[in-house]
Each structure stands twice: as C-alpha cells, then as structure tokens.
Amino acid sequence: MATFLYKLGRFAFRRRGLVSLIWVALLVVAGAGAATASPPANENFSVPGTEAQKAFDLLEERFPGSSADGATARVVFRAPDGEKMTDPANKQAVKKVIGELKSSSDQVASVADPYVSKGVSKDGSTAYILTTYKVNSMELEDKTRDALEDTGEHARDSGMTVEIGGDALQEMPETGATEVIGIAVSAVVLAITFGSLIAAGMPLLTALIGVGIGISSITALASTLGLSSTTSTLAMMIGLAVGIDYALFIVSRYRAELAEGRDHEEAAGRAVGTAGSAVVFAGLTVVIALVGLAVVNIPMLSKMGFAAAGTVVIAVLIAISLIPALLGFAGKRIVSRKARKAAEAGADTGEKKENAGTRWARFVLRRPVMVLVVAVLGLGVAAAPVASLELGLPDDGSQPTSTTKRKAYDMVSEGFGPGFNGPLMITVDTKDSDDPKGAANQVRKTIKGIDGVAGVSPASFNKAGDTAMLSVVAKYKPSSIDTEHVVADIRDTADSIKSDTGADMLVTGQTAMNIDISKKLNDALVPYLALVVGLAFLLLMVVFRSILVPLKAALGFLLSVVAALGAVVAVFQWGWLAGLLNVEETGPIMSMMPIFMIGVVFGLAMDYEVFLVTRMREAFVHGERPGQAIVTGFRHGARVVTAAAVIMISVFSGFIGSTDSMVKMIGFGLAIAVLFDAFIVRMAIVPAVLALLGKSAWWLPRWLDKALPNVDVEGEQLQKQLATGTASPEKDTELTRV
C-alpha cells in the first residue's frame, strides 16, 4: 500500500498538469450533469416491515386512487376578534378558498369543507381545510406548491389570520451566515497551522472541488436514484469535513518531509506513501460506517449513507492524487517565508523543536492514571443525560415560530387540541369477517374507550365493502411519548378484535409511521453497532498490527459518542443553552440521531486515531521505546489533529444556524462529538492507555500476524525499499506509462 501510494504521489507530482486537468474535467462534467438533470424521480417513501407501511399498502390496494400516502396540507383560518368562522362573510371567504384549492392543480385529490367535515372549532374561532394530494410531498410540482402558498390571500384581506401547515408545503431550511463562518474559521485555522496562505488554501480548494463533484453527482443522479435534499446536506457536511482533514494530513506530512531535507518530488511521494496510507484507511472506516446504515433497511437512510460515502471516496482520491499535483505547482511557497529563509540559511526549521504536543505527551506519560481517570469521569458526567433519552421524529411543532407551518400547528392545537395535528388512521380489513360493519363498529367502540383518545370518526368503507377506514385523534401532540403509548394501546387490542370479529386492524398515518420508524431504528442499533465496530476493529487490527490498540480505539469512541448524545439530550430535550443555540422547541430527540451519530462519528473519530497512532506505530517499528514513540507521534501529529478537529467542529457548527431542527441537531451533535473524541479521547485517553500498556499495546499473536495481510501503513517496507533503491523513480515505470 505505502509503496504504491509513494509511486502515485511522485507520478501526480510530475504529471501535475494532467492530473489537475482530469479533476477539473470531472468537476465540469458533474456540474453539467447537475445543470441538465431532470427533477427527482417519483419515489414513494417506504419503511418495509412496519405495521404502518403494511396498512398504507393495504389502503393503496383496497382504496384505489385514495392516495393514502399522499401529501397533505392544512389551511387554517382564525376569525378576527369578536367574529366567528361561522359568520356569513367569513364562511363565504372560506368557500372561495375551497374552490381555489380544487382548481389549483390536477395533483389535488380532495379538499374537505370544514363546515361539512367538522373542521370548525367548538368556540367558532378557528377552522381548517384539509387538502390531500394524489402524490407524496417529494412528487409535488412547484406550481402546485405555489398555488397552495397563494391560497387564502383573499381571506387575509378580509381580516382573517390564515396559515398553512402539512408536508405539502416544503420550506427549504436556511443555514444563514454560520455555514460560511464555519468555512472562514477553517481558513483561519489552516493559515495559523501552516503559516502560508498557499498551504492553507490548498485543503479548502481541494475540499470544495471534492464536495462540488460529490453534490453535483448526487443532483445529476437524483432523478434516477430518488435522492432528497437532505442527502445533499449530509454529503456536503461530511465531504467538507473529511476533505479538509485529509488534505491537511498530507500537506502537513509533505512539509515535514521537506524539513528533513528531501527534494520536493521525493517529499510528495513519501507524504502520500505514509500519510496517504493513513488517509485511505481512515476513509475506509468512514465508508464502512456510512454504508453500514443500509442494515437499518430504511431506503431513504441507506441512500443518504451511500451518497455521503461516495463523497468520502472522492475526498480520499483527491487527497492522494490532486494534492501532490497541486504541491508541484506550489513549489517552495508551500512553506512560510520565514521557514524558507531559515532553510536557505541552513537553520533548524523548528520541526524537531519541543512543541505543545511534545510537552503534553510527556505530561501524560508522567501521570497516565490521573489523566485517564479525569477524562473518563468527565465524559461520564457529560453522558449522564442519556439515561432520560426520549426518541421521536420531529413534526411541524418543532419548526421555528416564525414559519407558517408552525403558526398553523399552534392555531390547530389551540382551537381543536394538539392531537388534531397528527391524527391516526385505522384500517380494518374485514375480508374474513362475517359482519364487516359490526367489526368496524366494535373497533370504533374499543378505541373510544382507550385512555388518551380524544375522538374516533365513524368508519368509511371502500366500494367492495371489505375494508374500513377510521380516523383517531389523540389528546397529545403527535411527537409526544404519550401518543406513542396511545398507539401501542390501540395495537394491543388487535388480537382480541381479530378473535371476536375475524377482522385485522392496523394503525397507520404519519404519526404512526414516525413511531414505527423510531422503533425500527432502535431495533437496528445493536446490530449496526456490532457490524460497524466489528469491521472497523478488523481493519484497524490490520493497520496497527495489534489487538489492544483497535480495542482501545473502539471503547474510546463509545465513550465520546455516548457523551455527545448526553449533550444533545441536555440541549434539545432538557433545554439547556436552548436560547443560545436558538432551539425554539424542546422535545424528543430525533430517532435516527443515535444510529446516525454512531455511523458518522465512528468514521470521523477513526481519522484521528489512524493519523495519530500510525505515527506512534511508525516510530515504534523504527526502534523507539513505547514511551518515546508516543512523544514522537504527538510531536508530529498533535498540532495537525488539533487543527483538523477545530476545522471539523467549525464546519459542523455552521449547520447549527439552520432553521431546520433536524439539520441543527445533527450539526450540534457531530460538532460536540468531534470535540469530545479529538480532545479528550484521542489527546488524553489514548496516550494514557498506551503509556500504561507499554510494549504490550503493540502485541499480536504470531499466528494472527502471519494470517493478517501486511498493508504497510506506517511505511516500514517502503523505507526498506527506498534504502535499497527498489522504490526509486527509475523503477517507477508502471505509473509513468499511465
């Protein structure tokens, strides 16, 4: 591996014009594909294996044209003070809106008249029109949404308050200036780290090229693969972070090789051969973690993972090919002017001076037990809130209070009760029942008696008379734990109804679907964790030729991710610092957050582990004592890992400014996880544990050592080949012929 990458680095350095042209061409092709791509394909959101999905499928079969999983919109009206929605003028305005909605688009399936469908509140102050569409929210045309947004302007002119909610009205999240600030902070950190604008700009440039290719490819393939806007957000978030980090690792190693007196081409080859090997394996751990999301068996989540993994692969390829090419263009300007003058004068460039990383490593070596105990206890305290973790999926109630969706949600809650924002849909399959109507009536009567149910609509049958549909309103808001209990209680009655009437009862609707998704994610958590950690453990065992080092890496990751989840609970569920982060609504944590954080953070955490510990392994293999190897690893790697972590934190923190609660939560969770993992686990726990283990940290049974492939990440074989001349440029003819 190291030898191949060494040759690739030299080849890219020599043929820098060709390599750069190839990447620019790929960017242009991807951009052209994105610009000419058709809109995303009409793909139904599905969650195989859940009761809610089974009920949706039944409704599609038995109620053809009903669009059971179609988008919905709720146009909510509030009468002016002193008036009621039943007043003739207000009633006429609402009737006019109904007519506008019916004629607004051929995608409209039905428009419910509130004066017929009991959509007027008891006090007469509020009414709502429920509009259903033939397609889901992803398939709605722009003109359909525009018509919906324009609805009610006449009613507003008459003095009524009109707001629109539901998934039909898709409001794109705004990230504000914080995303740009995150990139700006990255630029400042890089400039301070390298002391050269050329060196600082290179990781940013290559990361943006990689993200540009990745996002453009996702956009170009969106029609074919049914990719959503959230997929692009995740890919951009991960791609920017790892793209900057991987480039930073290689540029830093290149400068270190120059400081050792290598010529520029040789330094590029050695940088790619050593740091590039670490980048490849770090990238593999991220890819494993993201692709592993497929085990959850939620198609949307799987696609997000695959798309983000593709962006990571692009970042790795750019790091090992485009970076050495750009280093060739940069020449001497890759190092600071001060360092160039010092080198010309024959002075020490400072690479071997005792730096902060060296001093910290020696401090940990003197007091490993104290550092380990303090670090573990600190993460334990941060993880404590996880004990009260409540999971759910966000609804319109988690939207910013300034949005029309949130205003509509609040108006419905005040006028009708919170449960009206997410009614449950009950399907009753009476095909095997002797008395279909009697079975439906028994279902209605049974559900009415369940604690927490506010109301149940009469059953409506399909034309064949073998399937009934009922609507159930809970007393609680859709995302609450109490609503989950109501759904569970309803489902618990299914067996008795089946035995009494022969009818099958299923609970569905968006609220029930969200609950089923949460359960599916929870059930997949342990298998996913075992798969990702297990595969990465094997990979790290190959990289480090050790059992205890990968084990320590995995346990350290678990500490950091649980602590990060604790911080997420404290902010987004308990409300700590909610005002500072502009969290307008606290509540259950997004159900995909634990599994998502495990996937993404594990891959990113291994970046630091691989880069930092490979330098220690390299020093140990070359004859240094275990303690000295730790110091050497920190002398060369601590500053770079610190810079990489600060950059990654700043990139993720940029998404905290988003108006979308899911994006905000993901940005905060990833930022705090990187903070814990980089500065507590990798910088404190790792050296403390390695100091306590000594030589045994690098122990590997002989039989296992022979069985595992030797990928030479630390460059031991490369060093031998360079010493004997077998890896010299003259021997490098294979890549030259490419």
Image (cartoon, grey):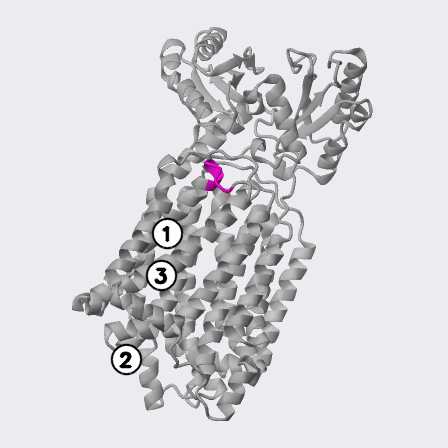
Please state the horizontal and vertical placement of residue 482, each as a whole percent of the image. 44, 23
Q: Residue at x 73, y 25 (%)?
A: 161
For the residues bearing labels 1 and 2, Cβ distance under 8 angstroms: no
Identify the residue under disc 2: 622
Let me know if residue 195 appears in the view. Answer: yes
How far apart are the alpha carbons under marks 3 and 1?
10 Å
Q: Residue most toward the left?
A: 702
Considering only vertical position in the picture, is 590 above or below 199? above
Please state the horizontal and vertical placement of residue 101, each as a whole percent of the image. 74, 26
How far apart are the alpha carbons under marks 1 and 2?
32 Å
Identify the residue under disc 1: 560
Residue 600 belongs to magenta span: no
Report the side of 145 relative to 450 (left or right). Answer: right
Task: Give the mark nearest the N terminus, 3 or 1.
Answer: 1
User: Which SS class for mark 2?
Assistant: loop
Report the side of 82 relative to 688 (left or right). Answer: right
For the residues bearing labels 3 and 1, Cβ distance under 8 angstroms: no
First to last magenta residue range: 571-577
Mark 2 or mark 3: which is in front? 3
The amino acid type found where label 2 is placed reads: His
Identify the residue under disc 3: 682
